[in-house]
Amino acid sequence: MAVFTSVSPEQLEQWLQSYDLGKVLDFRGISSGIENTNYFLTTERGEFVLTLFEKLTATQLPFYLQLMGHLAHHSVPVPDPVPDRTGRILGELNGKPATIVTKLAGRSELAPTPEHCAHVGAMLARMHLAGRDFTLEQANLRSLTWWREATPAVLPFLSDAERTLLESEMAHQEAFFASDDYRAMQAGPCHCDLFRDNVLFDTAEDGAPRLGGFFDFYFAGCDKWLFDLAVTVNDWCCDLVSGELDDARVHAMLRAYETVRPLTAIEASHWRDMLRAGALRFWVSRLYDFHLPRAAEMLKPHDPGHFERILRKRIEAVSIPWL
């Protein structure tokens, strides 16, 4: 969500002529994130987000946009793509594929409690089940195939200890992904990047936290539902300094998830493996973005050391929190 491609007010006004959104009241870049260019857009018709896609192609994008529309129409709170006057939800702006989606209410909760984690776990399970009848298919583009491609590119930048850890964990995950148990796990459309800053909360009348919705689906793909849950737990239920899991938050999220979709015995037996897979995915991508960065006006690369710590903690832990 950094600004890689600038859009002037004049360019925006011209592009919006194909929409029924009224006069532009506010337009500003969003600094967080590292993949796409995003702007907050306020018009006479409401608040929206304009996204220009820097890597994803017009061929790949229907999966993400139609998935969001599908989930929104199944009562999962996610941004809903806004069609232009011809019904199209994907256009082109400044040579990049571009779309407008509705803006969710609320703000990110960066210090979640078990109550926040329970809300996220239940809605994640609802999202998984709602995606079962989604007809488009696209693999998670940041899964094992991409790890294989990215690992050789980052290895020259690593210390001996980091290189040993990365090569060892890649071997472990290669074997896990090739197993019969892995193939037997339930799968479907997944968010694949459900971090704290990709969820919004507001406050109910009684003062309790109320889930506003999930957003930033542009890493979504068809994957194992347990992987999606592991990625989410690794962020929401983790101490950001030590990388340790917090038992209370893990239990709250897993219990809430299971009230909607009970986990299988195979999933339970590979919980540590999948937590490690989730940590590896983000360690590799952060190493890649840190050592091989792209130019952007507002780019803020993330620290790869955070997910190295998480991966080591998941490998070394005597026990892993479960139900």
Image (tube, helix red, strand yellow):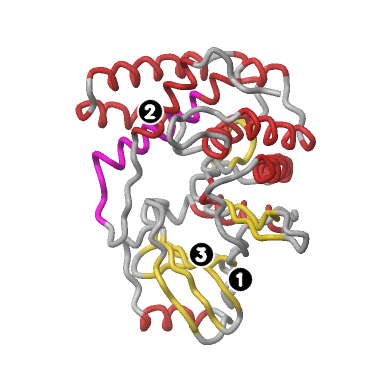
Which numbered tag is attached to residue 308?
A: 2
Q: Which of 305 and 83 is in front in this view?
A: 305
> As displayed, is residue 305 above or below residue 39?
above
- Tell me the mark number nearer the camera, choosing from 1 and 2: 2
Q: Can residue 206 be seen in this view?
A: yes
Would you say 7 lies left or right of 112 here? left
Q: Is residue 132 visible?
A: no
Which numbered tag is attached to residue 46?
A: none
> As displayed, is residue 292 above or below residue 250?
below
Q: Residues within 10 Å of mark 3 (few under 14, many from 20)?
A: some
> As displayed, is residue 108 above or below residue 178?
below
Q: Nearer the viewer, residue 211 or 86?
A: 211
Residue 180 among magenta residues: no
Name the kind of residue labelled 1 in the image. Answer: Gly
Q: Are marks 3 and 2 in contact (CB under 8 Å)?
A: no
- The residue positioned 44% from the left and 30% from the top of the image is 242
Q: Main secondary structure of the magenta part?
A: helix
Residue 77 image offset from top left, x and y in percent: 68, 56
Q: Residues within 10 Å of mark 1 (few under 14, many from 20)?
A: few
Name the kind of residue labelled 2 in the image. Answer: Glu
Quarter that holds the C terminus: top right
Q: Which residue lies furthest to the front in this view?
A: 207
Which residue was labeled with disc 3?
A: 90
Magenta range is 276-295
Q: Nearer the viewer, residue 266 or 165?
A: 165
Sequence-wise first label, 3 or 2:
3
Calculate the distance from the C-alpha at mark 3 to the C-alpha at mark 2: 37 Å
Sequence-wise first label, 1 or 2:
1
